[in-house]
Image (spheres, helix red, strand yellow):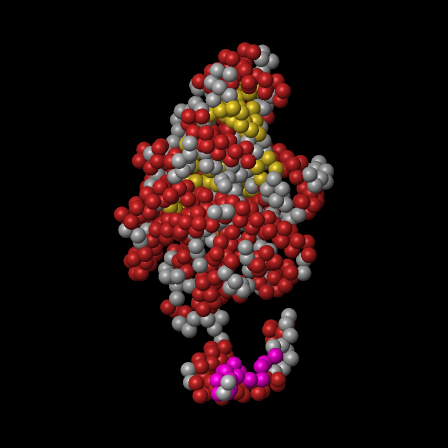
């Protein structure tokens, strides 16, 4: 289809040179605009404000946020698993969270079935869609302003961990919360380094309002999102 | 392009249930948007940024598209270009055939509606299932979306309950929304597992990194772009933006304008197919770039502003006409103000020019548009193009198609009178004196109104008399 490409580009370029080029902003001006924008939108929250902002916004999107500590979370999770009767779990063998889950949580609950996401989805699909109750993963970071988790799936924690199981538990280090999306992009420098296969911003459990504007959770993805702050 | 717009609008106005459904939905969406943009200074600031970013993207459109193409290819995303809907359908069908695909699941994509993809694939034995809840409902009902963001907005809960009960086996009638959504979830989850192809739209395509961005709440978009072995994304060429740093303001404008959300549940940035050590994600990702009249819009110095649109739907949510007649009355893929600007440019003013009349030029759409598209000006411009005396010089398809001799002569006469004060005085003197002789029926004007009562003296006359009076 090179001809379609050439035709489209030729039409656009012809129109561009004819009259519109002058509306193009010069590059220096453009950079200035971008810089101003980041300055205008950047928030500088104090640590407490940031945490509050994040928690409030995420809770407003119907997620549960549990304040915990690095040492205590497995114990807390055990309690949660017992009350909610979540018996089939998906975890990663390759992350610290996954390892602690399998050591501390699974050993304490012998009835728990924990399956590592260590085979390609093709071999796991059936189990993944039909048997798993919950998955536990780590967050790469978070954005306070909108109450958003930054999730970067990859070989260690594949994409579907945060999508298919009805309950998604995410461990987030408080120190990783930043103020805005702009700051995230600045910090990660993806525009130069390139992006990972997939980057996800997740703000709450899956939802829909497609039936008469009535909110319903768990449209296609998790019905509940539980964020454990450590 | 079924019945004329005017007839469909009249028909829609008589449907009480439909009007109630739309009124409720539009009030809800307007309220939500207003609440989330409580800071009006921030809103104006953001809109200016949105305007600038998209204007810059348009000014450099061909270069950005080339950059997008090469960055995507570098990332392993295969890029295809289509000039027409037929070409786009052929490309997509070709990819599906190559992969022996039988079942495709589709995330929300207005461009796929624009090219009539479902029908095209169905006719060739490929099942193409909508997976967005609203789109799924609309597909079950064998209808088309009536809103670009909330496709099933024209239906009430009970109408959907009846539909599910009648079309999905073993589904009892229930108006419980959680149960209804549960039914959809169950059926679609089976399909996600089986599908060989996932199809999606694109909200923003970032040129500098070759990244496809999708905005959604349900997670069906993520399913479609992750579970099946092949992902095909389709989008209009105007969706390209220069840099990653353009995303924060645009995303914020989009979600807040569309549904009044600070951010949607998922913002999904896809930059490549599955890498060798990864365990899920599609093995192949394709991007289809569709022109379908966009490069023609690009040639018009004013109408090209149409291409800034980020498809948020705010213009229809605030349009007094759309709110009353609903999306189907327009009979087009894109309804409401943006539809009135886009559709006649795609299909020609001769085919779809009539819909430009369904506008009172009240300006609400232009005021809410997150990228400051002057929609009322564009609608007026299209009306002008429709009666263009030199259609050959206009880049708009079907320009001049509505021009009539009588109307043109009448206006020419009026201009002549207006330019000559003496003549103007005589004409208005007679018009006011003979005003009472106006017939009771004045064509379309008196179809829903009483005939106007003409004053017995013109304003000029009255003012002249007054200024001559000694006080
Ligand atoms: S024209 Fe403006 S308001 Fe309407 S859908 Fe496009 S971006 Fe939104």
x and y percent of residue B344 in the render?
A: 48, 61
For the point 40% across and 72% down, the residue is B390
**Taking A60 as reference, is A86 above or below it?**
above
**Taking A34 as reference, is A90 above or below it?**
above
For the point 58% across and 84% down, the residue is B456
x and y percent of residue A125 in the render?
A: 53, 26
Is residue A17 or residue A61 the one in the foreground?
A61
x and y percent of residue A169 in the render?
A: 53, 25
For the point 39% across and 46% down, the residue is B240
x and y percent of residue B238 in the render?
A: 40, 50
Total labels: the figure holds 0
Is residue A157 or residue A25 the one in the foreground?
A25
For the point 58% across and 55% down, the residue is B327
Q: Is residue B467 magenta?
A: yes
Q: Is residue B384 left or right of residue B158?
A: left
The span picked out in magenta is: B453-469
Q: Does any portion of residue A221 appear in the rendered image?
A: no
Quarter in which the N terminus of chain B is drawn: bottom right
**Taking B275 as reference, is B93 above or below it?**
below
Q: Quadrant of residue B431?
A: bottom right
Is residue B357 or residue B402 the one in the foreground?
B357
Q: Quadrant of residue A95?
A: top left
Q: Does any portion of residue A144 appear in the rendered image?
A: yes
**Taking B212 as reference, is B28 above or below it?**
below
């Amino acid at each position: 289809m090179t001809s379609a490409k050439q035709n489209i580009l030729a039409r656009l370029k012809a129109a561009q040179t004819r009259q519109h080029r002058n509306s193009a902003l010069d590059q220096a001006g453009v950079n200035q605009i971008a810089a101003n924008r980041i300055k205008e939108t950047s928030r500088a929250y104090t640590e407490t404000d940031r945490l509050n902002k994040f928690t409030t916004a995420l809770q407003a999107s119907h997620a549960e946020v549990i304040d915990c500590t690095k040492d205590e979370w497995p114990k807390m999770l055990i309690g949660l698993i017992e009350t909610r009767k979540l018996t089939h779990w998906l975890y990663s063998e390759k992350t610290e969270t996954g390892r602690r889950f399998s050591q501390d949580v699974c050993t304490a609950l012998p009835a728990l079935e924990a399956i590592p996401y260590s085979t390609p989805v093709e071999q796991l699909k059936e189990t993944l869609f039909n048997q798993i109750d919950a998955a536990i993963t780590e967050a790469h970071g978070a954005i306070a302003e909108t109450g958003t988790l930054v999730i970067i799936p990859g070989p260690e924690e594949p994409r579907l961990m945060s999508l298919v199981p009805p309950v998604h538990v995410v461990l987030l280090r408080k120190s990783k919360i930043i103020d805005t999306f702009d700051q995230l992009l600045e910090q990660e420098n993806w525009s130069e380094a390139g992006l990972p296969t997939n980057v996800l911003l997740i703000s709450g459990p899956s939802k829909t309002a497609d039936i008469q504007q009535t909110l319903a959770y768990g449209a296609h993805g998790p019905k509940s999102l539980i964020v454990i702050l450590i | 392009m079924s019945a004329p717009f005017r007839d469909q609008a009249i028909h829609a106005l008589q449907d009480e249930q439909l009007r109630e459904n739309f009124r409720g939905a539009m009030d809800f969406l307007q309220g939500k948007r207003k609440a989330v943009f409580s800071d009006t200074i921030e809103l104006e600031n953001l809109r200016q940024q949105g305007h600038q970013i998209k204007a810059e993207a348009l000014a450099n459109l061909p270069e950005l598209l080339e950059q997008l193409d090469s960055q995507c290819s570098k990332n392993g995303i295969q890029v295809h270009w289509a000039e027409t809907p037929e070409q786009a359908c052929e490309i997509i069908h070709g990819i599906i055939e190559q992969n022996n695909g039988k079942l495709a699941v589709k995330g929300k994509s207005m461009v796929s509606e624009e090219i009539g993809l479902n029908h095209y694939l169905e006719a060739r034995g490929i099942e193409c299932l909508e997976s967005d809840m609203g789109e799924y409902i609309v597909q079950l009902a064998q209808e088309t979306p009536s809103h670009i963001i909330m496709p099933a907005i024209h239906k009430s809960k009970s109408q959907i309950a009846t539909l599910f009960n009648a079309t999905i086996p073993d589904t009892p009638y229930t108006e419980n929304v959680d149960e209804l959504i549960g039914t959809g979830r169950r059926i679609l989850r089976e399909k996600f597992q089986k599908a060989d192809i996932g199809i999606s739209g694109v909200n923003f395509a970032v040129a500098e990194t070759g990244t496809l961005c999708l905005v959604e709440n349900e997670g069906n978009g993520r399913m479609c772009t992750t579970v099946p072995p092949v992902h095909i994304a389709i989008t209009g060429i105007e969706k390209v933006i220069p840099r990653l740093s353009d995303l924060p303001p645009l995303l914020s404008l989009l979600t807040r304008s569309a549904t009044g959300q600070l951010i949607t549940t998922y913002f999904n940035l896809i930059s490549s197919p599955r890498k060798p050590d990864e365990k899920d994600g599609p093995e192949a990702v394709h991007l289809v770039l569709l022109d379908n009249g966009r490069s023609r819009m690009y040639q018009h110095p004013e109408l090209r502003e149409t291409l800034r649109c980020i498809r948020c739907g705010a213009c229809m949510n605030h349009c007094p006409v759309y709110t009353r007649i609903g999306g189907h009355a327009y009979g087009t893929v894109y309804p409401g103000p943006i539809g009135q600007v886009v559709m006649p440019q795609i299909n020609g003013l001769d085919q779809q020019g009539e819909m430009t009349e369904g506008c009172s030029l009240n300006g609400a759409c232009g005021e809410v548009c997150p990228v400051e598209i002057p929609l009322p000006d564009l609608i007026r411009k299209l009306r002008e193009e429709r009666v263009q005396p030199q259609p050959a010089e206009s880049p708009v398809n079907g320009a001049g198609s509505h021009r009539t001799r009588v109307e043109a002569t009448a206006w020419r006469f009026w201009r002549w009178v207006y330019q000559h004060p003496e003549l103007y005085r005589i004409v208005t003197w007679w018009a006011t004196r003979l005003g009472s002789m106006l017939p009771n029926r004045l064509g379309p004007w008196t179809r829903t109104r009483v005939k106007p009562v003409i004053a017995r003296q013109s304003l000029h006359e009255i003012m002249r008399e007054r200024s001559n009076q000694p006080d």
